[in-house]
Image (tube, helix red, strand yellow):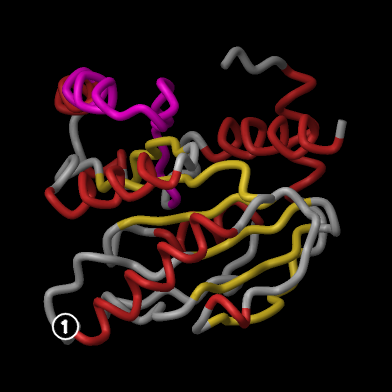
Amino acid sequence: MELNDQDLEQGRVLFAQNCEFLISAASFEQLPDSELPEIAFAGRSNVGKSSLLNALTGRKNLARTSNTPGRTQQVNFFDLGGRMMLTDLPGYGYARATKSVVEKWTRLIKSYLKGRVQLRRVCLLIDSRHGLKATDHEAMDLMDGAAVAYQIILTKCDKIKASELEKLLEKTHKEIAKHVAAHPEIMVTSSAKSKGIEELRAALTTLANSAAE
């Protein structure tokens, strides 16, 4: 997607709006009724979802960050200016989670993906230092099966060298080509250095605008 200055400005304006926490849903029945276009954020535990949400909205404590992975065990909903819903999905791949908890998370995510018609895209966050793991492929297969469009967002790109990042991008492009619901464009971000944040805001805003048309 080619982004221009107007796109970037629209993204800045939208994400400068008030962003309010609505609800933490532990079951499909608790998901809020809404007609707003919805963007979900998914990824392995400790991939940086909370930090990215905070960076996008320019707030320090919108989404809780923690050094202990697996803290987000419900689907958290945030209303962005009455124009877009941001959804923080439970992190997966947390080794210390019990089997019953993992199964509960999986059921919730499956029901959310298949039953949320206003869901425009899932941002699938991947740690630049590690690349796609087996659990990421499982998540991608799940979204392929649910026919939910998703886009790879590389996080923590400030933690690796530029040459390593280029190799990772090439490898990841080849891997996502095998997945039918994957968006072909990969976005590169660093919440700590604000890299790629402006571009991601703009890309998500274009989705909200197209949904409103």
**Residue 148 vertical placement versus 72 (above, below):** above
**Residue 189 vertical placement versus 172 (above, below):** below
Residue appearing at x 73%, y 48% in the figure: 37
Of the pair 125 and 101, the residue shown nearer to us: 101
Left or right: where 146 falls relative to 135: right
Residue appearing at x 70%, y 15% in the figure: 4
Q: Which type of secondary structure does the marked residue at label 1 adopt? A: helix
**Amino acid beneath label 1:** Lys
Residue appearing at x 35%, y 81% in the figure: 71
Q: At which x and y percent is residue 117? A: 65, 51
Q: At which x and y percent is residue 213? A: 87, 30
Give the mark count.
1
**Residue 195 vertical placement versus 61 (above, below):** above
How many C-alpha atoms fall within 10 Å of the one at disc 1: few (<14), some, or many (≥20)?
A: few
Q: At which x and y percent is residue 177? A: 28, 20
* Residue 87 location, quadrant: bottom right
Q: Which residue is mark 1?
A: 99
* Residue 178 counted in the magenta span: yes
* Residue 173 location, quadrant: top left
Which residues lie in the magenta part? Answer: 170-191
Left or right: where 34 falls relative to 60: right
* Residue 96 location, quadrant: bottom left
